[in-house]
Structure formats: C-alpha cells, structure tokens
Amino acid sequence: MSLPDDETTTELRCALTGRPLTPEEAYWAPPLITARQLITTFFKTLFSNPAALGAIFLSELPDVPYAPEARPLLARRRSAEQAKLLALLLVIAVVVVGLIFWLVR
C-alpha cells in the first residue's frame, strides 16, 4: 500500500522545543551547539583523531527546523553560549599570560 502524494513520510519537529511543524512554517537554521558540546568534541577529536579537527570544525552543518516562535529563545541561547565560550577563552588567556609573567620573573 503506497502513501498518497500529498502525505509526507517524515515529520518535522522544532529542534529546540520539539513542537511538530509544517514545512511552510519551519524556520531553517544551523543547529544550536553548546559550549560544552564544542569543548567536548574538540578534546575527544584532539586525542582520538587530530587530523580530523579541521574537517569537523570547518565543515558546514545542515540546517535544522525551528518553530517561528522559538527564534527569540534560539537567539538568547546562542548569545549565552557565545558568552560562555568567550569567558572561557578569556580565562585561558589570563592564565597563560599569568604563567608567562610568573616564569619570566
């Protein structure tokens, strides 16, 4: 038994809220990647297959569907993750500079 032409076999769900979506209302954007996921992926790849780091971090991710009402939430979550990553990088920079000054003294 075959499906009618107007019926789809895959159901779209918002990647953030899980709400079912129609293809017409879906907002397509890259997936949300948390700072934790980014750091975990970096270290796992660094120790298991360092040659793949460039391919993993420079490749384009496929877009995922989001509900239109999830756009503000997605923007806040992306900004929060960027702030966390920036704070971590600044802490690392301060530690490195502190170590350099401590070793030169």
Image (spheres, rainbow, N blue to C red):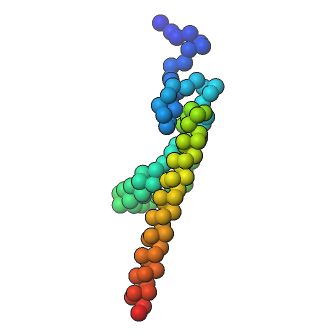
Asked if one can make out residue 38 in the rendered structure from this viewpoint, the answer is: no
| Furthest residue in direction top, as rendered | 1
* Residue at image coords 52%, 32%: 14
In the rendered view, does 64 fall on the left or right side of 37?
right
Q: Nearer the viewer, residue 49 or 81?
A: 81
* Residue at image coords 60%, 30%: 26
* Residue at image coords 48%, 64%: 87
Q: Examine the image and state in which quarter residue 65 appears.
A: top right
Rendered view: 98 above or below 66: below
Q: Position of residue 40 (x, y in %)?
A: 39, 55
Q: Examine the image and state in which quarter residue 98 appears.
A: bottom left
| Furthest residue in direction right, as rendered | 24
Q: Position of residue 104 (x, y in %)?
A: 42, 91
Rendered view: 49 above or below 4: below
Q: Nearer the viewer, residue 103 or 44?
A: 103
In the rendered view, does 42 fall on the left or right side of 23?
left
Q: Nearer the viewer, residue 92 or 54?
A: 92
Q: Position of residue 42 (x, y in %)?
A: 42, 58
